[in-house]
């Protein structure tokens, strides 16, 4: 029997804000513990960061699990005289799709960096761009040297796990001083990827490594069953166990899609607030050292844009922090606009897209309207903002009047995601 083959492919105001928030909530900023990071991560928890990093984030891999998985399979009987090369058309058993977080796909630099960190930590070459095993050809060409009952297969190592988000935030050190460091933020999610596909053929009598892809394929042969031991003409052999495996996989995929659809539906229909508990102060969200700041839209279906404050701004550039909570030094709040009475949000229908724009909508109990605020050391009013639901950081593509505020999965590495919270 030939060795297995690989068929894979690879690629004023902040001081007042702090005092108000902590006094109202009875909370104080607490140091974030530095934890060891997985090998291969570009940023480590506890490392020093800069003000420009307030609007950025990096992944930290928390758990990993590697599972040999058969993606394509066919029982095949080879009789005496029918040995040699055969091209076998297999049936799909399991479909693995690469995904990070809620996107159901791979979008943005954060996802690519997360999967790259997974591969490096495990020493495996995993897919880091969107792909699916269903796109692979289901044909396997194999040279059978001996007669017997074979399982012809394609398989891979499915890699799953969870990640967290490393954000730049202030922490108070042991001597009472403050510093900006990379700490694990509230955001987290799960990922799925896989290694290169292998193809091969295995018989019941073959000795194979335990918990290997070949062993998984051998298990589908249902060795010892009448099908495996009976005489049979050369060619395909029905495999009840393989058919059941496919049935189970199809049911699991259907259930996962239904759960994802329900989650999207719930996100799209937020229930209205009974009341917003807003702090008394109002703020502009400025570009540091420049005149443009966040201004809410006047028209429906428009987004929050960079604008210069003037007599005609009509409070569209004034924001209040509402329903504020604080955990480990990170403020969570809804951003209520004084001018149009709406709350800042990412539209539900584009929330899974990189660079989806920020807008305002009727305030509701909705994580799309909740933001984490990462702060510079006391005395500075510079902040970074992260959407709670998507995990993405807020920023702008270029500094220009009318430029939309958008979400970026890793933030803007040039510092254009760092803003100033200025009391008015």
Image (cartoon, rainbow, N blue to C red):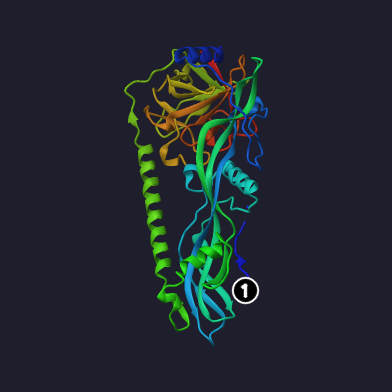
Which residue lies most toward the bottom here? 81
Q: Which residue is mark 1?
A: 2
Quadrant location of the N terminus? bottom right
250 vs 182, left or right, is left
Foreground residue, 96 or 423? 96
Q: Provide the secondary structure element on which disc 1 rests.
A: loop
Foreground residue, 212 or 252? 212
Q: How many marks?
A: 1
Above/below status of 14 relative to 128: above
Image point 63% across, 41% down: which residue? 38
Above/below status of 213 relative to 87: above
Above/below status of 46 relative to 321: below
Whole-percent x, y for residue 224 in the image: 44, 72
Residue 344 figure quarter: top left
Whole-percent x, y for residue 323 in the image: 42, 21
For disc 1, the neighbor class at 10 Å (few under 14, some 14 to 19, many from 20) is few
Residue 69 appears in the rendering: yes
Whole-percent x, y for residue 21 in the image: 48, 15
Image point 34% across, 20% down: which residue? 275
Whole-percent x, y for residue 304 in the image: 48, 29
Residue 405 appears in the rendering: no
């Amino acid at each position: 029997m030939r060795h297995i083959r690989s068929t894979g492919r690879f690629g004023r105001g902040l001081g007042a804000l702090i005092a108000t928030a902590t006094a109202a909530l009875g909370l104080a900023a607490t140091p974030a513990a530095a934890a060891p990071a997985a090998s291969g991560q570009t940023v480590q928890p506890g490392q020093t960061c800069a003000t420009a990093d307030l609007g950025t984030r990096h992944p930290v891999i928390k758990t990993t699990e590697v599972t040999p998985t058969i993606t394509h399979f066919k029982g095949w009987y080879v009789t005496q005289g029918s040995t040699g090369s055969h091209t076998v058309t297999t049936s799909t058993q399991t479909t693995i799709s690469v995904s990070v977080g809620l996107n159901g796909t791979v979008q943005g630099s954060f996802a690519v960096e997360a999967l790259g960190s997974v591969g490096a930590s495990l020493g495996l070459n995993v897919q880091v761009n969107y792909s699916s095993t269903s796109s692979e050809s289901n044909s396997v060409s194999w040279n059978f040297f001996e007669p017997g009952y074979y399982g012809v297969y394609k398989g891979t190592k499915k890699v799953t796990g969870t990640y967290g988000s490393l954000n730049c935030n202030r922490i108070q050190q042991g001597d009472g001083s403050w510093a900006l460091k990379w700490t694990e933020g509230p955001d987290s999610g799960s990922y799925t990827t896989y290694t290169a596909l292998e193809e091969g053929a295995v018989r019941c009598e073959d000795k194979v490594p335990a918990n290997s892809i070949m062993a998984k394929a051998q298990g589908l042969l249902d060795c010892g069953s009448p099908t495996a031991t009976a005489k049979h003409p050369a060619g395909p052999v029905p495999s009840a166990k393989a058919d059941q495996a496919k049935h189970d996989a199809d049911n699991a995929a259907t259930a996962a899609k239904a759960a994802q659809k329900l989650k999207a539906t719930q996100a799209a229909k937020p229930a209205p607030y009974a009341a917003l508990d807003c702090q008394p102060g109002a703020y502009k969200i400025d570009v540091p050292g420049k005149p443009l700041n966040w201004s809410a839209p006047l028209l429906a279906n428009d987004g929050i844009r960079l604008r210069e404050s003037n007599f005609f701004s009509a409070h569209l550039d004034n924001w209040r922090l509402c329903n504020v909570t604080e955990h480990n030094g990170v403020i969570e709040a809804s951003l209520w606009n004084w001018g149009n009475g709406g709350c800042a949000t990412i539209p539900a229908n584009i929330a899974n897209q990189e660079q989806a724009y920020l807008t305002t909508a009727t305030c509701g109990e909705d994580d799309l309207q909740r933001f984490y605020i990462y702060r510079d050391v006391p005395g500075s009013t510079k902040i970074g903002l992260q959407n709670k639901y998507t995990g993405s950081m807020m920023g702008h593509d270029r500094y220009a009047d009318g430029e939309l505020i958008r979400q970026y999965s890793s933030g803007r590495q040039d510092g254009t995601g760092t803003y100033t919270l200025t009391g008015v």
